Amino acid sequence: MQKGNVIRTVRAQPLVLLCCLTALSYSPALFSGFIWDDQGVFENPHFGSFAGLVNIWSTRAEIPDQTHYWLLTHTTFWLEHALFGTNAQIFHATNILIHCANCVLLYSLLESYHLKGLLVCTFLFALHPVHVESVAWIIERKVLLAAISIFYLKRD
C-alpha cells in the first residue's frame, strides 16, 4: 500500500464514523411519516408529470398553503416523487443524506483552513439538536440545500 493511500484511509475513517453516527442519530425520522405541513409537498399539482417540472422552473410553483418559491427544493421533491411516489421514508432518508454531505463538506472546509479541533467541530455540527427540525421535517430541505451550497462554494 502506498503512503498516499494510507493517508487517505486515515482521513476517511473519521468521516465514515461521522456519517454513520449522524445517520444513526437522525434515523428515528425515517419512521415519523409526514410531519405537520409535509403533506403539502405531495398536494403540489406540479408533481407527477414532466410538464410539472417545466412549470416549477418557468412559473411560481407553490406548495399549497405556502407562499414561497423554492426552485431547487421543489425540483428535488419532484424528482423523488417521480421515482418513489409519496413514500415519506425516502424523503426523510434524502434529508439525512444531505445533512451527512453537509458534515463532510464542513470537515473539508475546516481542513482547508488547517484548523485544530476540526473533528470536534464537525461532530458537534453533525449531532447538535439544532438541526433536528431541518433534517426531520421534509419541507425544511431548503435549509439543508442552502447549507450544502454554502459549504461547497466556500471550500475552494
Image: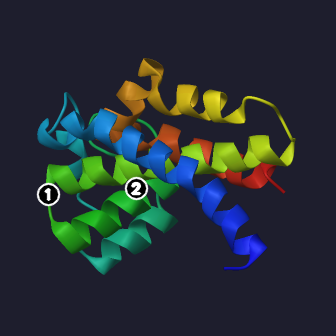
The answer to which of 152 and 50 lies nearer the viewer is: 152
The answer to which of 139 and 101 lies nearer the viewer is: 101
The quadrant of the image that shows the N terminus is: bottom right
**What residue type is disc 2 on?**
His
Snapshot quadrant of residue 39: top left
Question: Few, some or many C-alpha atoms within 10 Å of disc 2 (few <14, some 14-19, many ≥20)?
Answer: many
In the rendered image, the residue lying farthest to the front is: 1
Q: In the image, which is nearer the foreground, mark 1 or mark 2?
A: 1
The answer to which of 44 and 5 lies nearer the viewer is: 5
Horizontal placement of 153 versus 101: left or right? right
What kind of colouring is applied to the model shown?
Answer: rainbow
In the rendered image, the residue lying farthest to the top is: 129
Q: In the rendering, at what x and y percent does residue 84 appear?
A: 18, 68
Residue at disc 1, secondary structure: loop
Q: Residue at x 80, y 31 (%)?
A: 116
Q: Residue at x 55, y 54 (%)?
A: 13
The disc at residue 86 is 1
Horizontal placement of 77 versus 130: left or right? left
Horizontal placement of 26 versus 19: left or right? left
The disc at residue 36 is none
**What residue type is disc 1 on?**
Thr
Q: Residue at x 50, y 57 (%)?
A: 72
Residue 43 visible here? no
Q: CA distance from mark 1 to mark 2?
A: 14 Å
- In contact (CB < 8 Å): disc 1 and disc 2: no
Q: In the rendering, at what x and y percent does residue 75 appear?
A: 42, 62
Q: In the rendering, at what x and y percent does residue 78 appear?
A: 32, 64
The quadrant of the image that shows the C terminus is: bottom right
Which residue lies under the disc numbered 2?
74
